Image (cartoon, rainbow, N blue to C red):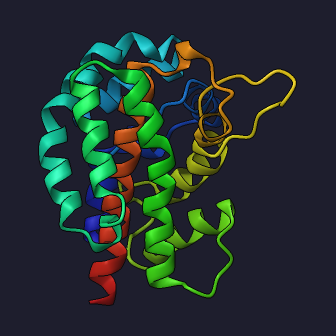
Amino acid sequence: LLGQFYAYLMFQEFFKISESSWNSLFSQGWFPFISLRTETVQELINHANAEWNLDKMLGTISAEVKSGLPSWYEKWKKAGYFSDNIKFLGVSVERFLALDYISAVSVLYPRIEGVMRGYHIATTPDAPQTQTGLVESSLSSIDSVLHPHALLLPEKFKTYMTDVYFANFDPKNPKGLSRNTVAHGVASEDEYSEKAAIIGFLILEQGSWCRAAGVESSD
């Protein structure tokens, strides 16, 4: 209980994000990812509160991701549910660092779902492998572990994965980059960007922290 109070007092801006600010974050593809520096997340939230263009922070966020990515990848290699996809993720990391964003994103976005399927099969093998089912199985295991003021913000992350990563599209006028526009080959060339790759890696790392919480609880 004291830990919850401490987290709430230290990071109040994380837990007081208004619905309009959440809408601004999601509509621009962003989330207060756990792997970003606290100061960066605070600035991202401030930008969302002011309804500014969040992509103005891309340079700062890119530098943090490039710094953390090698150690993230090493951690992913040790997680069993990453195993079937780890070589693909390695290629995506290499292509990203080589500034080949089309290749990095093309490989990365389907493999995020692949990692989710690996975890789903390992933990709930008989449950339907729908997109909603994958999100639930990947994150629901931590609901009883994390207190309401956990910085992973698991409930909002579920919504983000459903509404942003797995976003649907209009077949007659497809817009935006998501798992579905990439998989169906309708995302425009401009969408295969540095931002898209960065967000993909941040999604994987956020998910790895969430699943680690669930795994530790069962151990």
* Residue nearest the observer in this picture, 12 or 127: 127
Residue at x-position 50% and y-position 79%: 121
Residue 52, position as x, y percentages in the image: 51, 11
Residue at x-position 44% and y-position 19%: 193
Q: Is residue 147 above or below residue 13?
A: below
Residue at x-position 13% and y-position 42%: 70
Q: Is residue 145 above or below residue 45?
A: below
Quadrant of image for the C terminus: bottom left
* Residue nearest the observer in this picture, 99 or 37: 99
Residue 80 in view? yes
Relative side of 48 to 91, left or right: right
Residue at x-position 45% and y-position 27%: 196
Q: Tag count in the figure?
A: 0
Residue 99, position as x, y percentages in the image: 28, 18
Residue at the right extreme? 172
Relative side of 151 to 24, left or right: left
Residue 143 in view? no
* Residue nearest the observer in this picture, 140 or 103: 103
Quadrant of image for the N terminus: bottom left
Residue 178, position as x, y percentages in the image: 60, 36
Q: Is residue 71 above or below residue 171?
A: below
* Residue nearest the observer in this picture, 91 or 75: 91
The quadrant where residue 68 appears: top left
Residue 141, position as x, y percentages in the image: 47, 77
Q: Is residue 218 above or below residue 170?
A: below
